[in-house]
Image: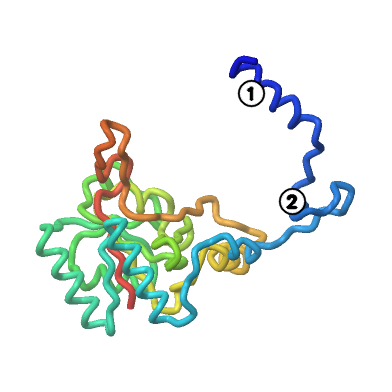
Amino acid sequence: MTDREAILARVREALTVTAPKPGNHGGGSHHDPVVSPGPGAARKWLPAVGDTFEEMVALFRANSAELKTDFHLLNNVDELTQTLTRLREAEGWRRIASHNGELARAACETLGLPVCGTDAGYDVNEMEKCDAGVTECDALIAQTGSVLVTSRSAGGRALSVLPPHHVVLACREQLLADLPAAFELIKSKYAPNYPSFISLITGPSRTGDIERILVLGAHGPKKLTVLCL
């Protein structure tokens, strides 16, 4: 028997087995009613996350470093002001893009720069000229080092994509343990009227398509900074 014949024989054998209905992969009969296991059921297959805030911060920080995300845990508004000012001076920001949110407004006032706002109509060409996009978020996810954003929490779709530097503003209570917790948050916060855009941002934009060489900023922001207050 050739390799091709062996592979086809295994395919034919597999096709004789009736596949379970969605939601019944735990060994139940395919005649049983479909019962959704819920997002929390996936935790047994996912990497463990600590129970305390300190453990989650440590994990998010470690994942951020691996992903090349610049993460800062801040103690007060003064530290937020100092960090934003350092970024502005170090990178020579002349214009920023942002949206209407409590933290976002405070950041814009601190930076004292012209702002391309996304809450009303805006010129995409003008946004592309901005040095940074400053947004809020829905959550930070310790398990993966991801930032959860939606079109409602982050000022639309373009703000977290077009400017070369994405600065995320978050509160400590927005730090979640894992992906199931993030999915539960989205459901409790938005269901049944979900935002048109829901995204998990895991590090700055990157690609390794050419010669397996990592290139940042290929399809979006080259730099991602998370400031957690």
Give x and y (percent) for residue 20. 79, 45
Report the residue at 18% width, 68% height from top.
112
Which labelled disc corresponds to residue 226?
Answer: none
Whether 61 is drawn above or below 162: the answer is below
Q: Of callouts 1 and 2, which one flags the residue occurring earlier in the amino acid sequence?
A: 1
Report the residue at 38% width, 66% height from top.
136
Give x and y (percent) for residue 163. 27, 50
The local crowd at label 2, few if under 14, some if 14 to 19, many if 20 or more residues have their Cα within 10 Å, is few
User: What amino acid is found at the position of numbered circle 2 in the picture?
Assistant: His
Which residue has dot 1 on it?
7
Residue 168 can be seen, yes or no: yes
Q: Is residue 91 left or right of residue 15?
A: left
Report the residue at 42% width, 81% height from top.
53
Whether 42 is drawn above or below 125: the answer is below
Which residue has dot 2 on it?
25
Q: Is residue 173 left or right of residue 182?
A: left
Report the residue at 86% width, 54% height from top.
33
